[in-house]
Amino acid sequence: MPTPEPREPRTRKADTLAMLARPAIDVWVATASAAGAPYLVPVSLAWVDDRVVVAVESSSVTARNLTTSGTARLAVGPTRDVVMMDVVLERSVDVADDERLGAAYVGQADWDPRPSPGYLFLVLRPVRVQAWREANEIAGRTLMRDGTWLV
Amino acid sequence: MPTPEPREPRTRKADTLAMLARPAIDVWVATASAAGAPYLVPVSLAWVDDRVVVAVESSSVTARNLTTSGTARLAVGPTRDVVMMDVVLERSVDVADDERLGAAYVGQADWDPRPSPGYLFLVLRPVRVQAWREANEIAGRTLMRDGTWLV
């Protein structure tokens, strides 16, 4: 199958927002410890008010790394239709303590963390967003920089 | 669709080895800088002599992080049929300088890095391997520990 022509920036942004809003979509969350040990895990995602929301155990490596460093790098989609995001931790809240956020999360994800003791919602604000499919889309991949959409 | 029964450890190992040997398969490579900045990128994978081999530019963040720290965390497959691997950098070699490795890489991956100046093969040795599909496979997910297959 020939590689399709590279998408226009506006199309990439529209495809990105559609992917982030997709029901039952997962996200790869890459974090690092203060000592520089990399960590990576797939979790369910919700896209709420232009933020990525994930639910993790407060004792998990991901929660500890994010709470300490405040940063993560995310990937959504398959390796050849990917949205990469550098994010900062905006806030974390016990899953039982934010009714509106809980409802929004459960409305998109395919599981409900609210009955699980010790789970947190991590609210992640994108600062850089990139989207590409094949090598011919590497040019023009950056859609958001310093928290501002370029398109 | 109901969640299938969890797979036996031997089945998970067989599925894992089959996935790693699949033509044109990609791997998510999570690394971290010495300062603890997480990085993540998808690249093509080859499985050669029980090692994960990737080809990256020597100046890339991934190459720099791996050369400095010696460790990465990898994910192969979709989020709900995943092989997670903690790996150590065994060696790196210019893509033009190891004919046998180059032939093995090109035999599995769907591109040929050998004509690209500045590209390195990174040879990554697994020390921990985990495989799961859905939540009911979290128990029993560890297939290799301290570099030794448990099954």
Image (spheres, coloured by chain):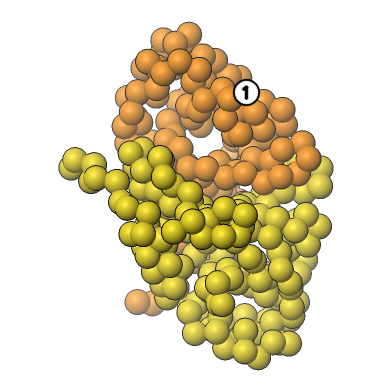
Chain colours: A yellow, B orange
Q: Position of residue A43 (x, y in %)?
A: 56, 65
Task: Say which chain tag 1 marks.
Answer: B
Q: Position of residue A144 (x, y in %)?
A: 53, 56
Q: Residue at x 62, y 84 (%)?
A: A101
Q: Nearer the viewer, residue A151 or A66?
A: A151
Q: Residue at x 50, y 28 (%)?
A: B56
Q: Residue at x 42, y 35 (%)?
A: B44
In this picture, residue A146 sits left or right of residue A4:
right
Furthest-bottom residue in this view: A99
Q: Could you say which quadrant of the image residue A113 lies in?
A: bottom right
Q: Nearer the viewer, residue A11 or B82?
A: A11
Instruction: Say what amino acid the circle numbered 1 marks.
Output: Glu
Q: Position of residue A80 (x, y in %)?
A: 37, 47
In this picture, residue A86 sits left or right of residue B109:
right
Q: Label 1, secondary structure: give it.
A: strand
Res B78 seen here: no
Residue under numbered circle 1: B90
